Image (cartoon, rainbow, N blue to C red):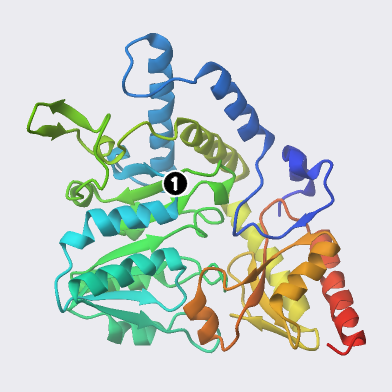
Amino acid sequence: MLNDEIRNDFPFFKDNDLIYLDNAATTQKPQMVIDRLTNDYVNNSFNVHRSNYMAAQKTTDAYENVRHAVAKFIGAQNDKSIVFTNSTTDGINLVANGYFINQIQAGDEIVVAISEHHSNLLPWQRIAKQKQAHLRYIEITTDGRLNINQAAEVINDSTKLVAVAAVSNVLGTLNPIEQLTTLAHQHHAQILIDAAQWAPEMPIDVSELKPDWLVFSGHKMLAPTGVGVLYGKPDLLEQILPPAVGGEMVLSVDREHFTQQQIPIRLEAGTPNVMGVLGLGAAIEYLNSVGMQNVQEHCQMLGQKIYNRLSKLDDVTVYGSTIRDTGIVTFNINGIHAHDVASALDLRGIAVRAGYHCAEPLIKALHTNSTVRASTYFYNTENEIDRFIEAINLTKEFFNSYGH
């Protein structure tokens, strides 16, 4: 169990009474990351991989050290497996438009989960239409978990890709990615794992899991916005046709042709988000100091507490498993629109998310039109959860008193 004093590392909480329960969207930043960014903007504001003077080389070295830190953070054996992107969405689209657009043929099948975030659905919908391929879905069980038995029927020898989130951004469920990876590889298909909600809360070891592709974002794990990571097996990264070409990704250029750099540099055309990458390095350093196992246990504890308390309330529907894997809990107050609930909570100083959560097919599969999502992180406290539940009760009383 993490000590509540860890909040002192986050300046946002020092003079702010907001109970922040929208961490699945983005996280607050510790002072360590803010200080590192300030220092880098002052002392390391140089381009990377280009200049020969020592100051710029120092920034290049720091940039590449983050690549090594990311590889170690997720258990990758080769730094060349790590490509810096703008976001999870950017990483998925890089794989879709740079690799699978040239691999998928008419009649092939792409398998996704019904619970996917739109970022891990729309690129595959588009490719399926362009290539006259088939998009097939893994459904959820009544307790909100992926139906692994049905998945074993859906994934077959026509499957070329299984694209699935490790953790649902709506249900907070840890999906059976080990079994899905095994199923995909048994049928000679590849698997892409959206780790946007996984990387911030749990340890990852790609050397053990052996996914073909894995993507995540920095801003959901204490880093700045605008930086993400694509992990790919080096032999697959070699086959990506870079969607962007230009500065830095070339070795030589003549009037008619150009020669590309090796991976991963050839997939990072133009000036990269140097400061974002350096901030990601600081965030990983901070998370390592806290310990990802500690982060996981604390978030799981808070998620279970929210679920247990909400489940005891009349006229509240909580979605997903009774056993919580993460700090994400999604619910509705019967008869009150999710947006109204979120607005009422906001008036009481509590920030939650309401709507489709960029997962409209899942929301429809849950037979509702929107939900409220409370998502915790390791700096949230049990006292905040108590105040959140109290605010839910007051919200119910307010709307009921007006016959809503």
Q: In the image, is residue 388 above or below residue 214?
A: below
Q: Is residue 97 above or below residue 189?
A: above
Residue 302, image x, y percentages: 71, 64
| Outermost residue toward the left in this view | 256
Estimate the x, y position of residue 386 in percent, counting from the top left.
84, 66
Residue at 12% in and 32% down: 258
Q: Is residue 368 left or right of residue 15?
A: left
Assess disc 1: are there few (<14), some (14-19) or many (≥20) residues with their C-alpha within 10 Å of its C-alpha: many
Residue at the outermost right position: 401
| x and y, in percent, of residue 366 in the image | 55, 86
Residue in the image at 53% along x and 56% along y = 202
Indicate the amino acid at tag 1.
Gly
Q: Is residue 239 left or right of residue 232?
A: left
Farthest residue toward the top? 53
Q: Secondary structure at mark 1?
A: strand
Determine if residue 404 is in view: yes
Per the image, the residue denoted by label 1 is 228
Looking at the rendering, in which quadrant would you find the N terminus?
Answer: bottom right
Examine the rendered structure and indicate whether residue 47 appears above or below residue 240: above
- Count how many numbered circles sit on residues in the image: 1
Quarter of the image for residue 355 reads: bottom right
Locate the C terminus by quadrant.
Answer: bottom right
Q: Nearer the viewer, residue 147 or 237?
A: 237
Q: Residue at x 76, y 78 (%)?
A: 310
- Judging depth in this view, the residue of 399 and 39 nearest the camera is 399
Residue 212 makes an appearance in the image: no
Residue 298, x across and y down, in percent: 67, 58
